[in-house]
Image (spheres, rainbow, N blue to C red):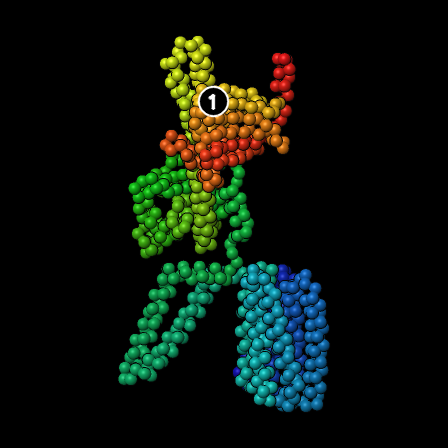
Amino acid sequence: MIIGVISYATAAGIFVALMLVLLTGHAGGSFKRLLMVASLVSAAWATSAAYQAAYNSPFIFTQLLELLRDFVWLTLMLHMLAARSAGKDWISTWLKLARHGVYAFTAVMMLLAVYRYLTSPDLSFLAQFDLQLAGHLLLAVMGLVLLEQILRNTPSELMRAIKYICFGVGGIFIYDFYLYSDALLFQRVDAALWEARGFINAAIVPVIGIGLARNPQWSPGLFISRRMVFHTSALLGSGIYLLAMGVGGYYVRDYGGTWGAVAQTIFLFGACLILLILLFSVPLRARLRVLINKHFFHYKYDYREEWLRFIKTLSSSDQNVPLPERVIRAMAEMIDCPGGVLWIRHDGHEDGIFKPEALWNITLPVPASEPANSSLIQFLEIQKWVINLDEYKCDPELYRSLGDLSMPSWLNFIPEAWLISPLILHESLMGFVVLTRSPASHKHFNWEDSDLLKTSGRQAASYLAQHAISQALAEARQFETFNRLSTYVVHDLKNLISQLSLVVSNAARHKSNPLFMENVVSTVDNSVSKMNRLLQRLRDGVQAEPNRSVDLAQLLAEVVRDAQAAKPAPVFECDAVNLAVTADRDRLASVVGHVIRNAQDATAENGSVVVRLQKINGHAVIEIEDSGCGMEESFISARLFRPFQTTKGSSGMGIGVYEAREFVRSLGGDVYVDSKPGLGTVFRIHLPYQAAVKFVRHQKNLH
């Protein structure tokens, strides 16, 4: 009997405490009000049950208050389910029916309880009527069904705040289900289970409290200091430890024989000595503080806002502030530091070295470099800790216990140096940031600041690595463009050299011919002009001559005339006039000239090379046909238009046809090839054209 009184009195006191806590603050809305009502009704029910246990007399209010308690808790769970299922019409309809069903069933159960009490006013009626026991059991089942629906319909990101509320309220109905199913099975309410029920209900209140603390909307306005929780946890842990040691000492005495009492004394003394050592252990106390702060208190930062601001600073488009400086600023602003210095790893030295990369809000000479094998670098890379220099000065052994660590002398030249934060990329140290002291006198650096700096340091390291890779890629692309342009220039120079070689080879026979000498001067002057333009293009990089309107008939006539010095001499057939394209004239002439020279190289001196200009299906078509050796279809499809593929052996570079097609495609056209071995080849260059109006007028004036 006395156990039942203590059990239910404890439950009443705990529920009253929960109700008083909920009365503080104003947030929470309807949920908080329902929870206060549930706590009040539960406290009243537990008080009534304690009174009944104390006087061992029937008390109808206990049964009615228990039904009212179940009704309020079920209403609370229906409210939670409605909040989780907003926007789902079928669930809303189901909830309305369930709510009305709970109302009706509770009313029926209350009427039944009053009727049974009036007809059998003693405590034995519960054992005589299965109907009332089945009703209590059904209420418990309703609670468990609602619990399952709440957990099923709660998104995973909200489960952290809701699960402890569900566990606490669900614990009430789980125990009721066990109690009344046992009573229904054995036709009696087990006295031990009934007396333990108060303690069980009291035990679920702290679980509900954890759920309230995890949700800012439900959290009460009370504040419990971290120091109080720390000391309470330490005392509770010490009590559990001593209790366990006491049980151990009991068994040591009983099974120790003649040495039992002595062994028990030694055992308990050793246990107390170990407890004393643990209580004064600085690392253990620090870890306990971190554990409590992480799991029992609200976070110090609004991480969403901090992260958005951090990413915004890193990804700023302000070209006047380089990325390394933005990294320092982004990390410093999170913990209110006024400045900092960034070191980045450089692998050009034998073991690697960390050099200062940027300074922010610090006016001092550039600090010294730090070798990669120094104790500071090794500590940062292995431990990945944020070093608090104030903590290091007060207790250097705390850091040295984790590894050999000594601070470099250049730290003394950074005024108010406070923190050293590593930048970790793929578990390797990419760099580190030294931050200066926050001007806020109340600023206390703790585990949360450390975690924030370490996480932001990893993100900053990835940004710096991506920035370095982008710079290297840009430089590689510049070199690639320069090398490609150099290859094209060399190819064009090769063609010019071929022209000049023909002049030199014919000079001995025709040097006394005035017409030949005039042609030589014209050829040399044209070659010099082309070489100057090629060198200018190489000097200017990818900037080519501006595109302008080029008359194709005039261009082809000039290219054919220049190519007639070699055998077989090409023949120009103009089947269309007044065709112009917008292009770089020199490059277009070089492309066509290259195709003509390839045709000459592939054709015997008694063969033929014909150049035609036609207009087909809205395109200007330049056709170069030869009667040479031709090419295999496999070579055309697989190798002809690939760079550095040639049929000329060591004398060819294999880029002319590739360059020709790329240039033609840049103009909106394309290149097509028909060839058969032994019969010859036809190159067709399709280009979009426009009417050569100015050229036509010029021709009319000539006529």
User: What amino acid does circle 1 point to?
Assistant: Ala
Measured as percent of width and height from the top left, residue 469 is found at 43, 41
Q: Observer-nearest residue: 699 or 202?
A: 699
Query: Does residue 299 lie above or below 473 as drawn?
Result: below
Residue located 39% across and 45% down the image: 431
Image mark count = 1
Residue at the (66%, 86%) spot, across then down: 131
Report the residue marked by disc 1.
569
x and y, in percent, of residue 567 in the image: 44, 23
Q: Nearer the viewer, residue 162 or 228?
A: 162
Image location (x, y in percent) of residue 84:
63, 63
Looking at the image, residue 590 lies above or below residue 378? above
The kind of secondary structure element at disc 1 is loop
In this rendering, the answer to whether 48 lies above or below 389 is: below
Task: Give 145 or 643, whichever is nearer the viewer.
Answer: 643
Position of residue 315 measured from the top left corner of the image (x, y, whole percent): 51, 42
Q: Decide if residue 441 is in sight here.
A: no
Point 63% across, 33% down: residue: 617
Seen as rendered, the residue at the extreme left is 258
When asked about the image quadrant of residue 692, the answer is: top right
When asked about the image quadrant of residue 185, the answer is: bottom right
The quadrant of the rendering that contains the N terminus is bottom right
Relative side of 177 to 431, left or right: right
